[in-house]
Amino acid sequence: MSVEGASRERSDGEELHPTHTLDDTVHQRVRLGILAIAREAGQVEFGFLKSQLGVTDGNLSRHVKVLEDSGLITVLKGYAGRRPRTWIALTGGGARALENELRALRLLVRRLDAGGSEDAGEGAGEGDGGYAGPAIPAPPPTG
């Protein structure tokens, strides 16, 4: 799932909650970490990712495979001296998916900071879809 305009509408014209635009492939903690570190570094070595994310070889391998199969990263194998090494780099699609995920998270944070009201606070509508969302109705009084 990708986020084009960062907000989507339901069939009744109401905008969907910002969490609707989160991408399950990207949003998972380890995979989000892989994408974020690869974006920061340009290209990152498997062992560095493992230590930074605090995961096992097998766990990291599985998440790398999911991202690679989704076309979000490329995996490059080679040698540093005589030691085999694996490097991970973002693809163009991976960079866009990460940016879309960050945009959705920013919209969610802005909405929560604004208390879920119509007024999403300073900066709403500037370059990210400006999702302010409808006010959340108050629960009915209990009697």
Image (cartoon, grey):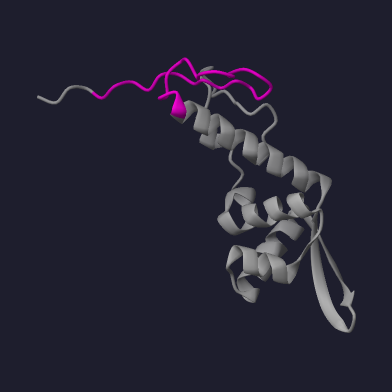
Q: Nearer the viewer, residue 107 or 66?
A: 107
Quadrant containing the C terminus in the rendered view: top left
Magenta stretch in the rendered image: 113-139
130 is higher (above) or lower (below) than 52: above
- In front here: 33 or 15? 33
Q: Is residue 72 visible?
A: no
* Quarter containing the N terminus: top right
Horizontal side of 34 relative to 141 (left or right) equals right
69 within the magenta span: no
Left/right placement of residue 54 relative to residue 77 reads: left
- For image coordinates 58% across by 40% down, the residue present is 22
What is the x, y in percent for residue 86? 80, 71
Q: What residue do we see at 79% from left, 45% from top?
A: 93
In percent of width and height, residue 88 lies at 79, 61
Main structural element of the magenta stretch: helix, strand or loop? loop
Rendered view: 135 above or below 103: above
Residue 7 sits in which quadrant?
A: top right
Residue at 45% over, 19% down: 134
